[in-house]
Image (cartoon, rainbow, N blue to C red):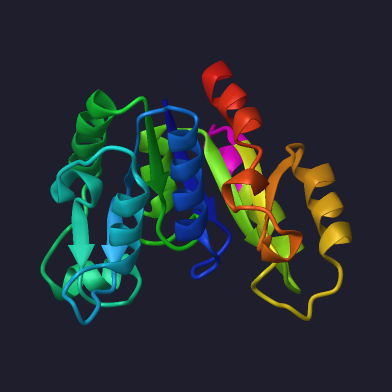
Amino acid sequence: MKLLVSGTDTGIGKTLVTCLVLRALKARGKSAVGMKPVAAGINLQNSWDDVELIRAASSISAPLEDVAPYRLRAPASPHFAAAEEGITIQSATILAALERLERRAEVVVIEGVGGFRVPLSDRMDSADMAQAIGAPILLVVPMRLGCINHALLTAEAIAKRGLTLAGWVANAGIDPHYGRVAETMDTISDRINTSCIGVLPDLALGQSSTDRLAIDRLLERLQAK
C-alpha cells in the first residue's frame, strides 16, 4: 500500500503528519517506510530536516537515494532549486525509487512538496507527480483564515486528476488565535465529502500524537483502494 501526504500550502505540517502516520503504522505492527521524493533546503549539517525526520519515524531502513531521490540545496520552489544545480526532476526516477521502497515495506508513506501544484520543472508539477504515483491522498489543512478556500480548491484539483482523497488532517497549531476550528472543520468536511482523521496539536488533550489520528479508518480506506 502507499499513501501520499499533501497539503494546501508549504510549512503547514506535512512532515509532522507523515511521521505520525509512520509511527502509528509501526505501533500496529506494519512495516512502513517514508519517502520524500523532492526535498529542498539543506541545513547547516548538510542534510535535510524533513528527510531525517521521516527516516527516523520509519520502521525499516532504506537507502537515502530511494527515500529522497532529489535532494536540493536551496530552500526554494523545486523548479528554481533544481535549475540552479543543473538538475531536471523526472518522474521516472521517482517512480523507480518508489518501486524499490514498495518491495521493502508493507506501506510507503510519501510526503509531497509544498502544496498540491508546485512546479518541479518546466513541464511537470507536483500534481503530475501525484498522478504518476497514483496513491490515495491525505490532505493537511492549516486552521487559519482562508483555509476553507484553499482546502476546497485543492480537493477539486485532486479530483480532477482522478485521484482519491482518503481523508484530511486539521492542523490547529498554525494560528493559535483562530477561534473557529470546529466550524471550519465541519465546513470543509461537508464540502469535500471526506472526513477529518485527526486534529493537531493535541498536547492539551493529554493524548499522544499517534492516538489523535484515526489510523485504522485510514487503513481501511487504503485497503479498499
Furthest-top residue in view? 224
Report the residue at 66% width, 70% height from top: 173
Residue 185: x %, y % from top left: 80, 54
Indicate yes or no whether the magenta region holds residue 162: yes
Image position of 66 (left or right of 143)? left
The image shows residue 58, relative to residue 141, as above or below, that is above
Using the image as rendered, state which of residue 224 and residue 91 is in the foreground: 224
Q: Quadrant of residue 42?
A: bottom left
Furthest-left residue in view? 86
The image shows residue 196, relative to residue 95, as above or below, that is below
Report the residue at 65% width, 29% height from top: 217
Indicate yes or no whether the magenta region holds residue 107: no
Quadrant housing the C terminus: top right
The image shows residue 135, relative to residue 130, as above or below, that is above
Magenta span covers which residues?
A: 157-165
Using the image as rendered, state which of residue 225 and residue 29 is in the foreground: 29
Is residue 124 visible to the viewer in this orientation of the structure?
Answer: no
The count of marks equals 0
Quadrant housing the N terminus: top left
